Amino acid sequence: MSSVQTQESVLSVETLLDQHDLIVYNDDVNTFDHVIESLIKVCRHDSIQAEQCTLIIHYNGKCQVKRGTFEKLEPMCTALLDRGISAVIE
């Protein structure tokens, strides 16, 4: 394996390791419409994606709604929490 291929492989692995998930949890407080609207505004989902995530949250108890670096996800997580939605970064 050449050094260029090795460097590219290492960079790819480092990029994957730096990825985190923004998880939203189900609750008995927020309405479907509020969660859908929040996912559209905060996570920039389109309406269909937001609706599907909301159904997954409702039926499975949680859903990974976004993947990215911690720095990218942290403001989204904070915005969802400010809207009363249970969210964490894993």
Image (tube, rainbow, N blue to C red):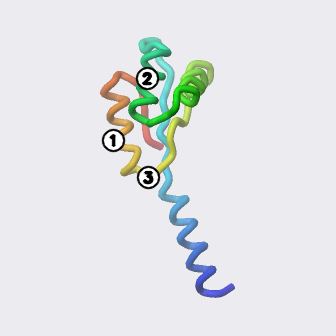
Judge whether 66 appears above or below 5 on screen: above
Amino acid beneath label 1: Pro
Q: Position of residue 57 (x, y in %)?
A: 56, 24
Q: Residue at x 38, y 36 (%)?
A: 77
Q: Nearer the viewer, residue 1 or 46?
A: 46
Judge whether 31 appears above or below 88 on screen: above
Report which residue position mark 1 lands on: 75
Q: Residue at x 61, y 80 (%)?
A: 6
Amino acid beneath label 3: Thr
Q: Residue at x 40, y 50 (%)?
A: 70
Q: Earlier in the sequence, mark 3 or mark 1?
A: 3
Q: What's the distance in space between the residues labelled 3 and 1, CA to CA?
A: 11 Å
| Label 3, residues with CA under 10 Å away: few <14, some 14-19, many ≥20 | some
| SS for dot 2 | helix
In the rendered structure, the answer to whether residue 56 lies left or right of residue 15 reads right
Report which residue position mark 2 lands on: 37
Amino acid beneath label 2: Glu
Q: Quadrant of the N terminus?
A: bottom right
Report which residue position mark 3 lands on: 69
Q: Earlier in the sequence, mark 3 or mark 2?
A: 2
Q: Earlier in the sequence, mark 1 or mark 2?
A: 2
Q: Position of residue 4 (x, y in %)?
A: 59, 83
- Say the numbered circle drawn on residue 4: none
